[in-house]
Amino acid sequence: MRGAISGLLLVAAVTAQPAAALPSQYYQRSVYKACSGGLVCEAAFPRVGADRTLTVNHASCRVYLSSRTATVSHVQLQSDKNDGIFFLGLTPISNPNGRTFTAQLGSGPVAISALGRPRIVLYASNGSSGTVSIECGIAGRLSPVQPTVAPAAQAAEEP
């Protein structure tokens, strides 16, 4: 019984670490979304934790348009925290049943704030009928949020 209680205390101590004590960790997620009847298709990834920031080093998508008249205007990586808008470069791929493209982040890294929800947004044009499908993946590093020191507290710490 005593071993079980000490084990529980150890688990509680490990999970109660402050964010600054948590190590960075690799992040990789993928998402699939099919949209129909519109010109905008958005696929959201899981939200970043409150004690972390996400640095996205790689983002890529495969885009499929069922309409032969539709075209992809552009594809963006962004978040719901207004961390900026980053465009993915498009490359068409031949496909007899529709139109297929790949999209890849050309510049980076991209920083996503704590509690931010990364998302890919595709804008199509010329043919809102049909289906737009996007399959995307992002990879990067989750890092602890660095604590901010108030100016008054910082001045008090200086000798």
Image (cartoon, rainbow, N blue to C red):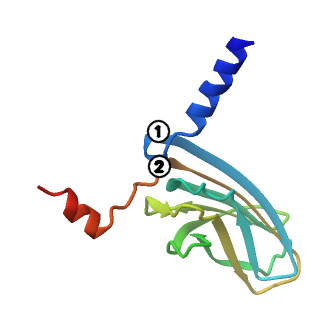
SS at mark 1? loop
- What residue is disc 2 on? 144
Marks 2 & 1, CB-CB < 8 Å contact? yes
| Amino acid type at mark 2 | Pro
- Name the residue nearer the viewer: 41 or 104: 41
In the picture, the quarter occupied by the C terminus is bottom left
In this orientation, does residue 77 appear? no
Please tell me which residue is depicted at 76% across the width and 87% down the height of the picture. Answer: 126
Task: Where is residue 101? Give x, y as percent.
Answer: 68, 64
* Left/right of residue 1 with respect to residue 28 in the rendered view: right
SS at mark 2? strand
- Name the residue nearer the viewer: 20 or 113: 20
Task: Where is residue 143? Give x, y as percent.
Answer: 47, 48
Please tell me which residue is depicted at 60% across the width and 37% down the height of the picture. Answer: 15
- Name the residue nearer the viewer: 48 or 130: 48
- What residue is disc 1 on? 23
- Name the residue nearer the viewer: 151 or 92: 151
